[in-house]
Amino acid sequence: MSASEKAAQTAPENDTAARALQRDKIIIKTSIIGIAANVFLAALKAVFGLLTHSIAIVLDAVNNLSDAASSVITIVGTKLAGKAPNKKHPFGHGRAEYLSAMLISVIILYAGITSFTESVKKIITPVTPDYTSAALIMVGVAIAVKIILGIYVKSVGKKVNSDSLVNSGEDAALDAVISASTLAAAVIFLLTGVSLESWLGAVISVVIIKSGVEMLKDTISKILGESADADLARSIKKTVLSFPDVSGAYDLVLNNYGPDRFNGSIHIELPDTYSAGEIDELLREITVEVFSRHNVILTAIGVYSVNTSNDEAAKMRDKIYSTVLDNEFVVQTHGFYVNEKKKTIRFDAVISFDAPDRTAVYADICKKVGQMYPGYELQIALDTDFTEE
């Protein structure tokens, strides 16, 4: 590889490392702000909650402490995710961020269950609250702080694609609702003498539990492995197709190793006149370009050859594709090639996951194509679109 080619590959790698470092700094800075705000609010609420005998305010203080713990977990997760790849983990440690997001979800779920239990206890054995003007002002300040903090943390989380920050931001928004409900209960008590805060606490706890379950399900889904984002898949294929003589880009598989960290593979269609040297040079150029534009490492690029010397092949391809695509569950066909010398026809058929029986659809395709060209050996691959929407 020439010096210029090495420089072309090194430049995007350095840019990516710089972006990753900057992202980590933003996440840690945001988390530290969250810790400071939540510790301050927890201390304030604990004091006024105990002085006014308000279970709602005390539970709110405990919830703020759990939020501070969530921010600490976010920092630890970000630090672990930023560790360089090693022999044991050659693809890096990016998935540690998903684990930290999962822990935050569990903390939120636990906080909801705990507050629900305490609220039920107070419903059974109620304690009359003793609100003061200072306590109500404190709750009002807490609402304002949590609204601002929630909007800020969630927006930063979306900007840097951090599930941990997004979850923390959503939790802060829930806290604002809890504090607002506590304030509403206090006003109702002062005006009517009726204490609703224990009942209100139970209702809010159910909302927190529901939120924690949804966050946990979303994070576990990402750990298990989801299909790639459709927009990202389309943009990668568009980049690949921008190269001369690449007539098709298919079978894109993206493996997620953390937020914005993907390794993948793809198949492309090239004229059957390309030499091994020309293919090698083109694949290297595609790999560098995709990494530079999308921060995705293509670890493998397969090649489908396209007939250039057999004029009848194009007619056969169009006829076969038309027949195969008549089946509602066949979403795509590609990789068509006819070898007249060996009398073989090969192509891939992408069959949707919506099909009741994908194997039966495949068998139907083979039967119909075989009837159309009985003198040929069929090499039809049952394919899957891993980015299917």
Image (tube, rainbow, N blue to C red):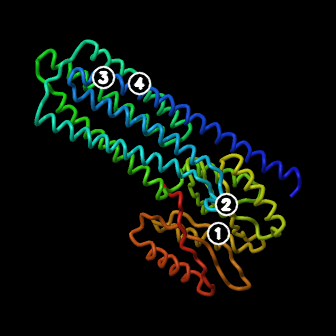
Element carrying mark 2: strand
Q: Which residue is mark 1?
A: 335
Marks 1,2: beta carbons within 8 A: yes
3 or 1: tag closer to the N-terminus: 3
Disc 3 crowd rating (10 Å Cα; few below 14, some 14-19, many 20+) is some
Give SS at disc 3.
Answer: helix
| Front-lying residue, 15 or 193 | 193
Of the two numbered discs 1 and 4 in the rendering, the one whose residue sits closer to the viewer? 4
Residue 336, picture quadrant: bottom right
Per the rendering, the mark at residue 248 is 2
- The dot on residue 143 is none
Q: Nearer the viewer, mark 2 or mark 3?
A: 3
Q: Nearer the viewer, residue 69 or 140?
A: 69
> Image point 47% across, 68% down: which residue?
327
Name the spot of residue 358 as percent of width and height, x first: 45, 72
In the image, 230 versus 216, the foreground residue is 216
